[in-house]
Amino acid sequence: MPASKAQRAATAERRTKAIQLRLAGVDWQTIATNLGYASRGAACQDVTRALEAHLAEEKESVDSLREIELQRLDRLQAGAWSAAAAGDLRAIETVLRVVDRRCKLLGLDAPTKHEVRQVDGLDAEIDRLMALMGSRGEGAAAPAATE
C-alpha cells in the first residue's frame, strides 16, 4: 500500500533531522534513539539512502543543464558554420571557440600535465656538487665557464 502524503512528509522530516544530527557529529545510536529508528543500522541506512537519492537528483539536474548548454552551443555553431566554411576568419574563430567550449563541457580535452620538481632533490644535488668541489682541494682553480 503506497504511503500517504502525511507519511512521506513525516519520513522526509525525520531524514532531514537525522542528516542534520549526523552532520553535527551525533553517533548513529543516539540518532536512532532520538528519532525513533529501530536500530542504529536502520538510521544509518535511511540517511545513506536519502543522501544517495539526493546525489542522483543532483546528477540528473547537472546532466539536464549540460544538455541544454550543448544545444545552445549547437545553435551557435550552426549559425556561424556557413561563414566559417566560406573562409570568414571571424566566423572561424567563433566556431573554434564554440568547439573549444563544447570540448571543455564534455571533458574531451586531455588533462594538462604539470612537472613537479622537489626542492629536496635540488638541495641534494647542490650538496653533491659542493662535496665534489671540496674534494678537489681549496686551492684548485674553478673550471672555466663555457658558453
Image: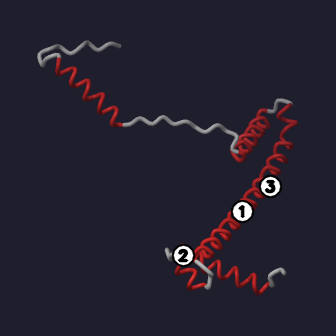
* C-alpha gap between disc 3 and disc 1: 18 Å
Quadrant in which the C terminus is drawn: top left
Instruction: Tell me the mark number nearer the camera, choosing from 1 and 2.
Output: 2
Q: Is residue 92 left or right of residue 38?
A: right
* C-alpha gap between disc 2 and disc 3: 41 Å
- Identify which residue is drawn at 77% across, 33% down: 89
Instruction: Specify the amino acid type for callout 1.
Output: Ala
* Label 1 SS: helix
In this figure, which residue is indicated by the disc labeled 1? 56
Name the residue at the right extreme.
82
In this figure, which residue is indicated by the disc labeled 3? 68
* Label 2 SS: helix
- Identify which residue is drawn at 75% across, 56% down: 63
Point out residue 91 in the picture as x, y percentages from the top left corner: 79, 37
Front-most of 47 and 136?
47
Instruction: Specify the amino acid type for callout 3.
Output: Ile
In this figure, which residue is indicated by the disc labeled 2? 28
Name the residue at the left extreme.
139
Q: Is residue 34 above or below residue 67?
A: below
Residue 95 is drawn in which quadrant? top right
Residue 44 is drawn in which quadrant? bottom right
* C-alpha gap between disc 1 and disc 2: 24 Å
Q: Is residue 74 left or right of residue 109?
A: right
Point out residue 37 in the picture as x, y percentages from the top left corner: 62, 81
* Label 3 SS: helix
